[in-house]
Amino acid sequence: MTSERLSSLTSWYAEWTGLRVAVLGLSVTGFSVADTLAELGADVLVLTESASEEYARLLPVIGVRAWTGSLDTVPEELLAFAPEVVIASPGFAPDHAIIRWTQGAGIPLWGDVELAWRVRDKVTRADGAPADWLLVTGTNGKTTTTRMAATMLVASGLRAAPVGNIGTPVLDAIRDPAGFDVLVVELSSHQLWYLGLQDGPEPVSPAASVCLNLADDHLEWHGSFQAYRDAKAHVYDNTRIACVYNKADEATRLMVEEADVVEGARAIGFDLGVPGPSDLGVVDGIVVDRAFLDDRRTSALELTTLVDLDAQGLAAPHLVSNILAAAALVRAVGAPPAAIRDALAGFTLDPHRMEVVAIADGVTWVDDSKATNPHAAHSSLAAYPGAVWIVGGLLKGVDVSGLIATRGPSTKAAILIGTDRSALTAAFERHAPTVPVFEVASDDTEEVMARVVELAAGVAADGDVVLLAPAAASFDQFSSYADRGRRFSAAVKDRIARGTEGEHDADAAPGDR
């Protein structure tokens, strides 16, 4: 009976009243799920290891029960509740005890994206249809591409928003009373793993989708690179108009070839070279579209130029790739080239993404704290060859030796931070033995960046770049990559304000290797 009922729940206006739903986790995503279900009239039990003061206060107000305690085993409260469906926040890995219990008991398991798709018709467009979805994933560049695509759509005169893993839950946008024409949905591999479990009556079916690139990341969550890759590939499932892929990354092309899409969906490639008739690319410094025009075999549409992008700080190769991907997505739903050009003319990158925080005494200090894996750091180092490189943190089970072998030898020096320094030290010894390496051993969050900046200032000379591109997660020493970036920026500005006072001498010698 439960299966039949869930099959009927494909609209906001379906009969959700009394449906027993267990919600795992009470972060921003978990609260958006609980709040939505409460509005629908479902019977909701939230299970969380901890709750913020705000959420703990709000749950009783919206009529939702909460259980707080250890989730290492299945709580008796969950067993007694006998949920008809479980909706998990993205942090719950496949091998989590409650996830295993849910699947073993045959209880349907959703993520927040599945719920959002089912109720997306709460507010419709002028034509009576729900907002179109554009899906964005990839190891790196997701947030930048998502923001770019949404900005391009708004410049086209459409009501659009960047949502999902970018920070605003998609359910919050679904319930916005003003409604949207298009939602650009950033999806993590965690969200896509849950999406891949679904085989319901109306699966998520985006207008266009993209996997930007694929490299090792989140292996501790997925268990293997293959599982991580397979999760990412779900972004293309049931795509209706355009499956956008990176011609420079063979893995993304293979994903498209294997995807089960709606008949008529096209494969649209992008890279920094001259584009083919169904691609976007670059010709003589001009960013062009050869995919979404009638005469694409002999013509191309100009979108912007590398000169214009350079003026906006957007000409780094990986950023141009993000622009091409975003442009392909929005062109699939009719955005005109002029809107793309106008949007890029006013676009600025997020904080902590290739952000120049200061230039002093000829040294440029760059915060790319959002480079939380080797693939992202590789792009940063490609943009700033010869930099003094600040690297380290939680490596999440990822091997950094390839990154250091390819980019390490060209750096002027390396400053290692974080708990996984030994792996970095060994990689530098093997692959870049002539590069000076310094270690900051302090675990004091308040002191780390001050020491890092002190060391970097002792190495950097006029014309050099000091680059924070950690290639690792931040949670060993900082609350987030943003916290890490803010502390770096503050330490840089503090040192500049103090001038050259306190120059160090012996401390600038390379640390123990």
Image (cartoon, helix red, strand yellow):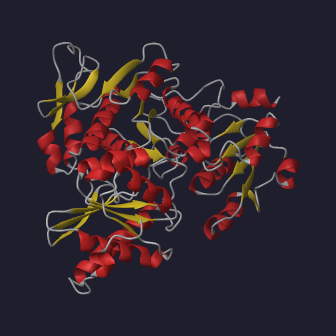
State the image quarter where residue 209 is shown: top left
In the rendered image of this protein, does residue 69 appear above or below residue 374?
A: below
Between 92 and 204, the residue placed more toward the observer is: 92
Q: Is residue 477 left or right of residue 335?
A: right
Q: Position of residue 360 (x, y in %)?
A: 17, 72
In the rendered image of this protein, does residue 361 appear above or below residue 407?
A: below
Q: Position of residue 185 (x, y in %)?
A: 46, 40
Between 429 and 167, the residue placed more toward the observer is: 429
State the image quarter where residue 461 is shown: bottom left
Q: Residue at x 25, y 58 (%)?
A: 387
Between 371 and 306, the residue placed more toward the observer is: 371
Q: Position of residue 291 (x, y in %)?
A: 27, 21
Q: Residue at x 16, y 13 (%)?
A: 298
State the image quarter where residue 84 is shown: top right
* Residue 156 in view (yes/no): no
**Total residue callouts:** 0
* Residue 388 in view (yes/no): yes
**Outermost residue, bottom direction?**
501
Q: Residue at x 50, y 68 (%)?
A: 477
Q: Position of residue 318 (x, y in %)?
A: 29, 42
